[in-house]
Image (cartoon, helix red, strand yellow):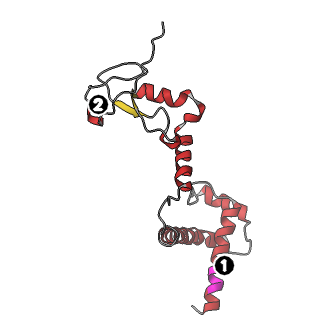
C-alpha cells in the first residue's frame, strides 16, 4: 500500500532545528535524523522553496530524473550566472598563479632531467652509441620511472636529450 505524499510545503527552519529532531523527512516521515534541504525545483532553474529530506531520500530525489544529476545542475547554474555577467575564478590567475606554477614545474623537470641525463651520458660513452629504446630499457631495468611514474620509452629519452641539447646550444650562443 502506497502512502500519499504531503502536498503542503514545510516551513523553512534553520539547520540546527532540522538536525535537532524538530522536523521529519517529507518523503518517508522518519524523525530524529539529520535532514537536508532539497529544492524540488532546482535553484539553477529558478526554484526558491525547499523541503526537508533525510540523506537517503535526498539522494533518491536527485536520481529519479535524468536531468537532476548534481553535475548537470551545477553546469546549468554556472551557465546562468555567466549569462548574467558574473565573473568566475581568479581574474589574476593567468598573470600570477599560472606563471608561478609553470616556473616550479619547469624547475622540477629540469632537476629530474639533470639526474636522468647523468645516467644517460654514462650509458652513451664509448664507440657503440645505444638507441633510444635501448637507453629506455636500461633505465627501466634500473627501476627508474618518469616524473609521472610510468616506465621510460624511447620518446622520453629523446625529449630529455633534446632539451639538454637546446640548453647547451643556448649557452654557447649567449656566451655563458
Calculate the distance from the C-alpha at mark 2 to the C-alpha at mark 1.
65 Å
- In this orientation, which residue lies closer to the viewer: 51 or 74? 51
From the top left corner, tell me how far across and down residue 105 is, in percent: 52, 67
Image quarter of residue 38 = top left
- In this orientation, which residue lies closer to the viewer: 15 or 99? 15
- In the picture, measured across the screen, residue 62 lies left or right of residue 124, that is left
Bounds of the magenta span?
165-170
Residue 104, disc: none
Q: Secondary structure at mark 1?
A: helix
Magenta-drawn stretch, dominant element (helix, strand or loop): helix
Residue corresponding to mark 1: 165
- In this orientation, which residue lies closer to the viewer: 12 or 148? 12
| Residue at x 44% of width, y 17% of height | 5
Looking at the picture, does residue 42 appear above or below residue 80? above
Residue corresponding to mark 2: 19
Total number of numbered labels? 2
From the top left corner, tell me how far across and down residue 167 is, in percent: 62, 80
Amino acid at each position: 500500500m502506497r502512502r500519499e505524499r504531503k502536498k503542503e510545503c514545510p516551513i523553512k527552519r534553520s539547520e540546527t532545528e532540522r538536525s535537532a529532531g524538530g522536523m521529519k523527512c517529507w518523503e518517508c516521515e522518519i524523525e530524529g535524523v539529520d535532514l537536508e534541504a532539497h529544492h524540488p525545483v532546482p535553484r539553477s532553474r529558478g526554484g526558491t522553496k525547499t523541503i526537508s529530506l533525510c540523506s537517503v531520500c535526498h539522494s533518491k530525489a536527485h536520481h529519479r530524473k535524468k536531468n537532476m544529476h548534481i553535475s548537470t545542475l551545477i553546469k546549468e547554474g554556472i551557465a546562468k550566472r555567466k549569462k548574467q555577467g558574473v565573473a568566475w575564478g581568479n581574474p589574476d590567475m593567468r598573470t600570477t598563479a599560472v606563471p608561478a606554477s609553470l616556473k616550479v614545474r619547469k624547475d622540477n623537470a629540469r632537476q629530474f632531467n639533470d639526474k636522468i641525463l647523468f645516467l644517460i651520458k654514462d650509458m652513451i660513452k664509448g664507440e657503440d652509441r645505444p638507441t633510444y629504446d635501448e637507453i629506455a630499457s636500461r633505465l627501466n631495468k634500473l627501476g627508474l620511472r618518469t616524473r609521472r611514474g610510468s616506465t621510460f620509452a624511447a620518446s622520453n629519452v629523446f625529449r630529455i636529450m633534446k632539451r639538454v641539447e637546446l640548453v647547451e646550444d643556448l649557452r654557447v650562443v649567449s656566451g655563458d
